[in-house]
Image (cartoon, rainbow, N blue to C red):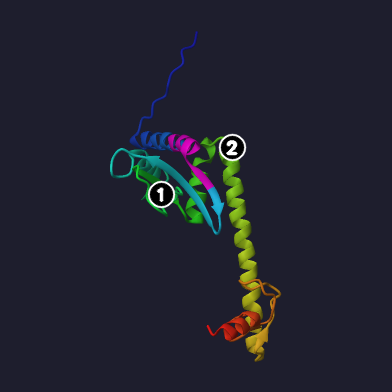
């Protein structure tokens, strides 16, 4: 009968690599239970809230941040769970990642250890962010190219076919990009 043996890491580098993998797996489990990733407005958010019994951030959040390469910030907890807004009476902190590249990096590191539900949540949030970003880029490129072309031709007005922030689909001034309807209303109201 063959005996099974457990191979232990022999070098310090192997031990460190094994510890890093264990810490990542632990962070993924912690994120599964406590954390969330979502796209809201123009921002992609990755957050893990944690109540604490001390005034500083919990050791668990510091361990999560270390496992993910020190990315993001640990903020005092708030009513909306993202470190913004009124601080709760209970002591809590939130580990957050706000930059798209940081969120993407964290998800890539945790991906092998995440359950299908969290993977789907991450996919939906990232796809929503990317599609909204691409739409904004298209609008920006269309507006700027029309305006610069009109300027080059010496025209006073141009049209993009895209509604302004107030919803008017009207010509715009090449000098400042204002919609004509908004300019008329501003002139009437005196602002």
Give the main secondary structure, helix, strand or loop, of the magenta stretch.
helix
Q: Position of residue 81 (x, y in %)?
A: 45, 47
Give the structural element (helix, strand or loop) at label 1.
Answer: loop
At horizontal 37% and vertical 33% (from top left) the residue drawn is 15
| Mark 2 closeness class: few <14, some 14–19, many ≥20 residues within 10 Å | few
Q: Distance between the Cα atoms at labels 2 and 1?
A: 26 Å
Residue 191 in the magenta stretch? The answer is: no
| Mark 1 closeness class: few <14, some 14–19, many ≥20 residues within 10 Å | many
Left or right, 98 with respect to 53, comes to right
Give the structural element (helix, strand or loop) at label 2.
Answer: helix
Which sits in the foreground, 62 or 15?
A: 62
Disc marking residue 67 = none
Q: Position of residue 5 (x, y in %)?
A: 43, 18
Q: Which residues are magenta?
A: 26-37
**In the image, farthest residue toward the front:** 189
At horizontal 70% and vertical 75% (from top left) the residue drawn is 169
At horizontal 58% and vertical 49% (from top left) the residue drawn is 125
Residue placed under numbered mark 1 in the picture: 78
Which sits in the foreground, 19 or 118?
A: 118
Disc marking residue 117 = 2
Residue 31 in the magenta stretch? The answer is: yes
């Amino acid at each position: 009968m063959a005996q099974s043996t457990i191979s232990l890491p022999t070098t310090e580098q192997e031990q460190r690599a094994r510890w890093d993998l264990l810490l990542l797996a632990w962070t993924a489990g912690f994120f599964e239970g406590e954390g969330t990733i979502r796209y809201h407005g123009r921002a992609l958010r990755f957050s893990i809230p944690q109540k604490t019994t001390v005034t500083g951030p919990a050791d668990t959040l510091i361990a999560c941040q270390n496992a993910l390469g020190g990315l993001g910030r640990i903020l005092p907890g708030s009513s909306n769970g993202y470190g913004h807004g009124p601080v709760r009476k209970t002591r809590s902190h939130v580990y957050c990642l706000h930059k798209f590249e940081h969120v993407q990096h964290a998800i890539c590191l945790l991906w092998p250890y995440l359950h299908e539900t969290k993977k789907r949540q991450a996919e939906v949030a990232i796809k929503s962010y990317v599609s909204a970003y691409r739409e904004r880029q298209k609008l920006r490129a269309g507006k700027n190219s029309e305006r610069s072309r009109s300027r080059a031709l010496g025209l006073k007005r141009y049209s993009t076919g895209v509604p302004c922030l107030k919803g008017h689909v009207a010509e715009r001034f090449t000098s400042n990009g204002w919609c004509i309807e908004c300019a008329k209303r501003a002139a009437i109201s005196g602002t």
